[in-house]
Amino acid sequence: MTRRVLNLASAVSLLLAVGAAALWVRSCRKRSAVEFERRAVRWELASDRGSLRLDNEPQRRLEAEATARARARLMEECVRLSHESASLGQRLSQTPVADRPTLEAEIGRVRAMSVANRNERAASMARPASTTPLEAYATPYFAVAGGAGLLPVLSLALTARSARRTRSRRRNDLCASCGHDLRATPNRYPECGSAAR
């Protein structure tokens, strides 16, 4: 039973080693990547230049794009408020004295919005574009292929050792299973009870 499990694990490991070697060769020619989301964070698994890499760069890129959009919106609002303030200042100089309090109140509101916008822009520029710290893990394909290839090599070495031991025992008139001397009982092995072959 243990031998079957070892053989199955060796076969799976050999497939993994061959697959890793194939991806290694392919990664030297062409970059392949797949993005996925886990716990509300975007990740990328990439095969590139002889290594397998996992990082959260897509999440950082999304955050940087959102920050850039927010900063652009604040700049557009700043320009709009500046134009509005200039327009109101022009109208104030041409407005009769009786209508000025309403216009001055509007100018005060626009100035307050301009101050709030300036503070928001300063706070936005002070913050980093992405708040998620970079997490990156990489391993070279030769390590994956080599690690996966160890179990098949070990299994092959154990099989070769067992076959060599069996041949040696048969050559020396010993039981192939237990190694007991067969010269006294050539038809049946007294230790393990198996019939001679």
Image (cartoon, rainbow, N blue to C red):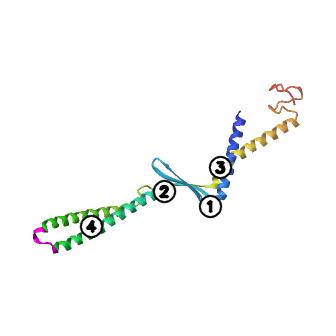
- The residue lying at 75 percent from left, 44 percent from top is 156
Residue 9, quarter of picture: top right
In the rendered view, would you say 139 is above or below 102?
Answer: above
Amino acid at dot 3: Gly
Q: CA distance from mark 2 to mark 1?
A: 20 Å
User: Which of the two marks, 1 or 4, is nearer to us in this view?
Assistant: 4
- The residue lying at 12 percent from left, 72 percent from top is 96
Amino acid at dot 2: Pro
Dot 2 crowding, Cα within 10 Å, few <14, some 14–19, many 20+: some
User: Which numbered dot is residue 173?
Assistant: none
Instruction: Label 1, secondary structure: give it.
Output: loop
> Which segment is the magenta one?
94-99
First along the sequence among labels 4 and 3: 4
Q: CA distance from mark 4 to mark 3?
A: 63 Å
Q: Main secondary structure of the magenta part?
A: helix
Amino acid at dot 1: Lys
Residue labelled with disc 1 = 30
Residue labelled with disc 4 = 81
Q: In this rendering, would 40 be left or right of 48?
A: left
User: Which numbered dot is residue 58?
Assistant: 2
First along the sequence among labels 2 and 1: 1
Residue labelled with disc 3 = 147
User: Which of the two marks, 2 or 3, is nearer to us in this view?
Assistant: 2
Q: In this rendering, would 137 be left or right of 24?
A: left
Q: CA distance from mark 2 to mark 4?
A: 35 Å
- The residue nearer to you, when weighing 51 against 90, is 90
In the rendered view, would you say 68 is above or below 7?
Answer: below
Q: CA distance from mark 2 to mark 3?
A: 29 Å
Count of numbered marks: 4
Q: CA distance from mark 1 to mark 4?
A: 50 Å
